[in-house]
């Protein structure tokens, strides 16, 4: 059985848990993370020197970085629409996963941490800039969803949706001025029929 080190309130842990749900993989959660069990201890840092969750243990295999873990699980499971075998189709999925990890996450971090986590590391100007950047990045997503008419990488749910839906849900839940993005709103409604969406993108999981 897979062991996932982390906590369900972590957006990055939820990526991995949702992927396991969609692949029907058995797993157990070992509680780690801020407010639960401090990962800045030798025991944990021997697994991930960054002292961040999640960490995956699969037998003797140890992996960190949530998007990498999701890719590994999908590849491990074999033929799955979550990560197509075709080189170009897979690259399309991974392109949007990388965009989520670099562009989208970077945009929302100051606003989210200040408004939802109470961080005092960001002043009002930094928060306002973050809100603007976040909406700009979400407009890119809206245009992509309007183009596909369904999910991020095309007609089927993929890992791109797992990671991006969590960030889109976070955008919707954060008390900011939201850009009008009809394709994103339709997308989130569409995802309500996907197993695991209600659990990992519910009102109690910003």
Image (cartoon, grey):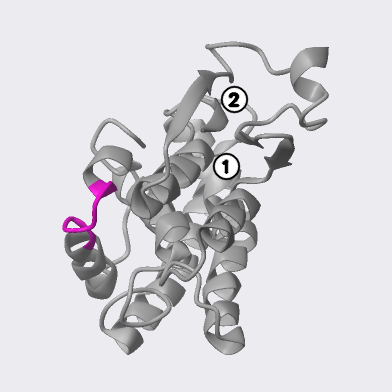
Crowd class of label 2 (few under 14; some 14 to 19; many from 20; radius 10 Å)? few
What kind of element bears circle 1?
helix
Position above or below: 206 against 118: below
Task: Identify the residue under disc 2.
Answer: 120
Q: Find the magenta span and give its range.
A: 191-197
Quadrant in the picture for residue 63: top right
Rendered residue at 39%/53% (across/down): 23
Residue 164, x across and y down, in percent: 44, 59
Give yes or no for residue 153 being in the magenta stretch.
no
Residue 90, x across and y down, in percent: 56, 78
Rendered residue at 34%/69% (across/down): 157
Crowd class of label 1 (few under 14; some 14 to 19; many from 20; radius 10 Å)? many
User: What is the distance, in whole Å, between disc 1 and disc 2 at their CAs?
Assistant: 10 Å
Prevalent SS, magenta region = loop
Question: The C terminus is located in which quarter?
Answer: top left
> Is there CB contact under 8 Å for labels 1 and 2?
no
Residue 126: in sight, yes or no?
A: yes
Give the label on residue 55, or none. Answer: none
Residue 35, x across and y down, in percent: 53, 12
Disc on the earlier residue, 1 or 2: 1
Position above or below: 193 against 173: below
In the figure, is residue 157 to the left or right of 78?
Answer: left
Rendered residue at 43%/46% (across/down): 20
């Amino acid at each position: 059985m897979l062991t996932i080190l982390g906590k369900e309130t972590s957006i990055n842990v939820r990526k991995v848990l949702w992927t396991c749900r969609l692949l029907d993989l058995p797993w157990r959660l070992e509680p780690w993370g801020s407010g639960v069990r401090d990962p800045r201890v030798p025991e944990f840092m021997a697994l991930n020197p960054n002292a961040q969750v999640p960490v995956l243990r699969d037998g003797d295999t140890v992996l960190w970085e949530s998007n990498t873990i999701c890719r590994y699980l999908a590849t491990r499971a074999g033929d799955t629409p979550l990560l197509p075998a075709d080189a170009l189709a897979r690259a399309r999925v991974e392109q949007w996963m990388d965009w989520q990890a670099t562009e989208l996450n970077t945009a929302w971090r100051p606003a989210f941490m200040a408004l939802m986590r109470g961080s005092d590391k960001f002043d009002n100007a930094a928060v306002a800039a973050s809100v603007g950047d976040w909406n700009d990045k979400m407009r890119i997503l809206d245009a992509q969803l309007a183009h596909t008419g369904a999910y991020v990488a095309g007609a089927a749910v993929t890992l791109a949706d797992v990671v991006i839906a969590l960030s889109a849900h976070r955008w919707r839940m954060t008390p900011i001025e939201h850009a009008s993005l009809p394709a994103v709103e339709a997308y989130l409604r569409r995802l309500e029929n996907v197993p695991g969406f209600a659990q990992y993108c519910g009102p109690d999981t910003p």
